[in-house]
Amino acid sequence: VEFSWSLSTRLVIGGWGGLSKVTTLSSLEGQLERGTQDIWNWAVTLAFPDLGKEGNLAGIIVGMEPWVSSSSIDVLGKDEDISLHVEAFYQYQITDNIAVTPGIVWITAPDNNNNNDDLVIGAIRTTFSF
């Protein structure tokens, strides 16, 4: 399920939520048995079109990484902890054909495990449109 709603020409809210009903087959020479899992994910988004200049776009995303809420597979089990994903980016339109987008991503409890250190990822993307 997804939605996107333009509150004004300068603010768009959105989000999604998903449930995957997974059935696995035996694999790894029988080390992984057949079974089922329910895997959830969701996010809320804010977008700011034309921020600073026409064609630019700023965005914020907050959501939950895919999370196994139930599992009949003993080896894999369900996730006890929840991993959150927080992201911010700013797409700067240099010309009609070139945009540069720096961004940062923060992931808490990677692999849905509070024993793991948080991740912070910096990114920069250049888009050429022709």
Image (spheres, grey):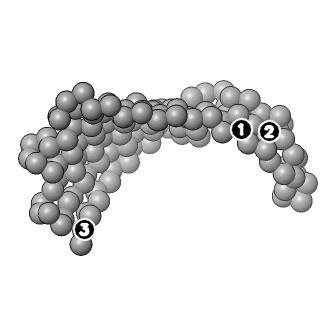
On the image, numbered disc 1 is attached to which residue? 21
On the image, numbered disc 2 is attached to which residue? 36
On the image, numbered disc 3 is attached to which residue? 129
Q: Is residue 88 left or right of residue 21?
A: left
**Marks 2 and 3 close (CB-CB < 8 Å):** no
Q: Earlier in the sequence, mark 1 or mark 2?
A: 1
Q: Is residue 34 left or right of residue 118?
A: right
**Marks 1 and 2 close (CB-CB < 8 Å):** yes
What residue is at 66 percent from the left and 39 percent from the top? 20
| Place of residue 81 in the rendered image (x, y in percent of width and height, measured from the top left) | 61, 27
The alpha-carbon separation of the residues under discs 1 and 2 comes to: 7 Å
| Place of residue 124 in the rendered image (x, y in percent of width and height, measured from the top left) | 28, 57
Q: Earlier in the sequence, mark 3 or mark 1?
A: 1
Residue type at the position of mark 1: Lys
| Place of residue 104 in the rendered image (x, y in percent of width and height, measured from the top left) | 32, 45
| Place of residue 8 in the rendered image (x, y in percent of width and height, measured from the top left) | 19, 30
Q: Is residue 107 left or right of residue 55?
A: right
Q: Secondary structure at mark 1?
A: strand
Can the viewer see residue 94?
Answer: yes
Name the one closer to the observer, 114 or 30.
30
The alpha-carbon separation of the residues under discs 3 and 1 comes to: 38 Å
